[in-house]
Image: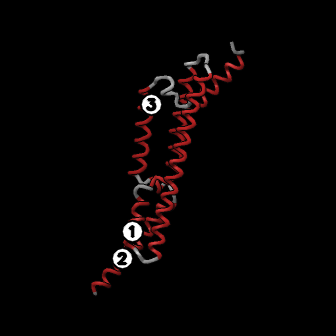
Amino acid sequence: MCAPRQTKTRHARTRLVNFSASTYLRRWWRAALYFTGTALLVGLAFVTNAADLPWLWRVLAVLWLGWMAVDGWLLARGNLRPLTTRDHLVPAAVAVVLVGAMVAGFLFYGAAGRRVYADGVAAQARADCTNAIKKYDTVTGPYELTLSRNVAAATTNREQCAAFAAAENAHVRGA
């Protein structure tokens, strides 16, 4: 049997590592609630042009993640029992993999948004406004949730390109 201090430390590590605790504690309805809440938060951010107020959405995301962590800790605190090595390692490994996948996904998402914006700027520099407008629309559409300054810049650049393209078309038509 473990000494009381060792048991307390082991339980604390379990609570910290398994912050969601939803699947570990068989609280599937809570996992569904948090998944739905996260999807609603992302959807709301997208339809309200989150890039216009990036710090508001960053704070909301941190508060949401913090609440889920606190709730998971409270759930885990009420379900303390002696742990085996497997009981400790499996949730820890799953948590590390999931958090790593989320961080990597967000980093790749941001990098892809920056690359599309750079392609739009390069197309605009070549006076290829048709292509630039498509790139800027992509930045202000699917890549809006990067919360990057590039989203606002893409909106401005798109307007400039649209004006240039309209003037070019008028010149070609002889107007």
Contact between marks 3 and 1 (CB within 8 A): the answer is no
Crowd band around label 2 with a 10 angstrom C-alpha radius: few (<14), some (14–19), many (20+)? some
> Measured from the top left, where is residue 173 in percent x and y?
27, 84
Indicate which disc, 3 or 2, sits on the residue closer to the N terminus. 3
| Position of the N terminus by quadrant | top right
Circles 1 and 2, Cβ within 8 Å, touching? The answer is yes
The type of residue carrying mark 1 is: Ile
Q: Is residue 30 above or below residue 56?
A: above
Query: What whole-number distance in Å separates the C-alpha atoms at marks 3 and 2?
Result: 49 Å
Q: Which residue is mark 3?
A: 31
- Determine the image quadrant of residue 78: top right
Q: Which residue is mark 1?
A: 133
- Location of residue 94 in the rendering, given as x and y in whole percent from the top left corner: 54, 33
Q: Quick one: label 3 or label 1, which is nearer the N terminus?
A: 3
Type of the residue with mark 3: Ala
| Depicted 52 relative to depicted 90: above or below | below
Q: Residue shown at 44%/28% (left/top)?
A: 30
Q: Which mark is residue 161?
A: none
Give the colour scheme of this rendering.
secondary structure
Assign a secondary structure to mark 3: helix
Q: Earlier in the sequence, mark 1 or mark 2?
A: 1
Check disc 2 and report the residue beneath it: 165
- Quick one: 74 or 22, which is closer to the camera? 22
